Image (cartoon, rainbow, N blue to C red):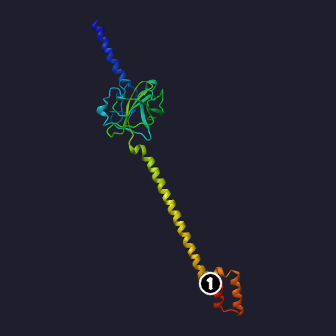
Amino acid sequence: MMFTKSISAAAFVLLSVSSQALGHALIEPAIGVTGTGARSDVQRPSTGSPCGTVNVASVVGTSTPVVATNGAFTVNVQNFNGGTDGATAIKSATVDTAATGKNFAGKVTITKNGVANPATTGTVQVSGTLPAGTTCTGGASGDQCLVSFTTNAGFGNCVLVSQGAAAAGGAANAVAAGTNTTTTATAAAAAASTTTTTTTGKGKGKKGKGKNGCNGAAAAGTRKAREVLAREAAGELSPRDGRSWLWAA
């Protein structure tokens, strides 16, 4: 009887170790893992332990997050064996906005998934989007969420997702700044064009005055101007008298 119990206990331990050792897919950057992850870093997330056996409180401050832009982010899924057990396809992904590992209430929408039955080992990218209106408040910087991933084969782990101000709005602000600069340059060009037109107008006015005085160039083309010039040519009027009469008229 005692021998049977010992066999059962040994089998349970072996099953537990095998379950961990046969972990076939790791979502990176995995919380609590420095550098490139290994097969031994793979977890089996569950409702009671969404991050597996990792002590979130002790590693959240030193783990590397991925950056979310307008809620969208991308992670790498590395599988260590081909086939269904090495699935890189994500079955579920939930988010804990406080990054404590205790309250995974929101559901992440997977927008680009992995492979359910990969033929070989390797790494693929998987993209997701945080729920609308999500505000991350955890992590070392106070702007991080914790996302728990589970693959089709039941393996996975947790990943920190940063929702920092630079990540969420930096690109949009840069575009807005560029637009404002372009608008200002256009306005300056328009102002320069207006100044040039005004200067040209003044030049024409001076040219007119220089020819006949008091806009004489325009006056010389009128009927009265031609009459005065004709009378001056006939000797009936002196140039001074005739033009004085013209301006008086």
Residue furthest to the bottom: 235
Q: What's the residue at 47%, 56% (across, down)? A: 181
Query: For the C terminus, which image quadrant?
Result: bottom right
Q: Nearer the viewer, residue 138 or 147?
A: 138
Residue furthest to the left: 2
Query: For the N terminus, which image quadrant?
Result: top left
Q: Position of residue 192 (x, y in %)?
A: 52, 66
Q: Position of residue 238 (x, y in %)?
A: 66, 92
User: Mark 1: few, some, or many residues within 10 Å (few <14, many ≥20)?
Assistant: few
Q: How many marks?
A: 1
Q: Position of residue 199 (x, y in %)?
A: 54, 72
Q: Quadrant of residue 102?
A: top left
- Answer left or right for 145 relative to 109: left
Residue type at mark 1: give it. Answer: Asn
Residue carrying label 1: 212
Q: What's the residue at 53%, 63% (across, down)? A: 190
Q: Quadrant of residue 54?
A: top left
The relative height of residue 162 versus residue 215 in the rendered view (above or below) is above
Element under label 1? helix
Residue furthest to the front: 249
The relative height of residue 182 versus residue 111 in the rendered view (above or below) is below
Q: Position of residue 155 (x, y in %)?
A: 40, 26
- Answer left or right for 235 relative to 102: right
